[in-house]
Image (spheres, helix red, strand yellow):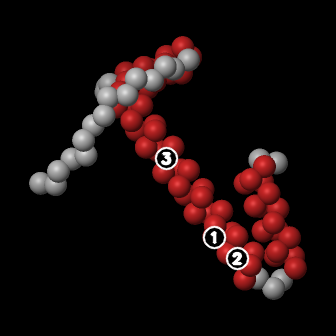
Amino acid sequence: MPKSEATIRQSVSLPGRVARHVRTIARARKTSANRVLVDLIEAGLESQAAEKERFFALANRLTETEDAQERRRIKEQLARMTFGA
């Protein structure tokens, strides 16, 4: 059986609206609010890593493509990812 990662106690202040939402999700899943927070944080970190990979993949495509229309389209995608247009 592999060793599990050490847990670290971390205090976090949440806005009331967010805390209520977390408790609602926890009740629906029949789990703790702590477990819901951990799941949401892990999902957010994975999403952020995937977005970063997507950005670098697009940047690589931009440098490799010779097609002007494709370059323009990729630049627009990169701009939306960077500036949220």
Name the kind of residue labelled 3 in the image.
Leu
Can you say whether 61 is above or below 32 in the image? Answer: below
Name the kind of residue labelled 2 in the image.
Arg
Can you say whether 57 is above or below 32 in the image? Answer: below
To which residue does mark 2 refer? 61
**Residue at the spot 45% in from the left edge and 23% down from the top edge:** 12
Residue at the extreme left: 1
To which residue does mark 1 refer? 57
Instruction: In this rendered view, identify the residue nearer to me: 29 or 1.
Output: 1
> Secondary structure beneath disc 3?
helix
Answer yes or no: do the residues labelled 1 and 2 have beta carbons within 8 Å?
yes
> Secondary structure beneath disc 2?
helix
**Residue at the spot 58% in from the left edge and 63% down from the top edge:** 53
To which residue does mark 3 refer? 45
Quote the CA–CA distance across marks 3 and 2: 24 Å
> Secondary structure beneath disc 1?
helix
Name the kind of residue labelled 1 in the image.
Ala
> Which sits earlier in the primary sequence, circle 1 or circle 3?
3
**Residue at the spot 34% in from the left edge and 31% down from the top edge:** 35
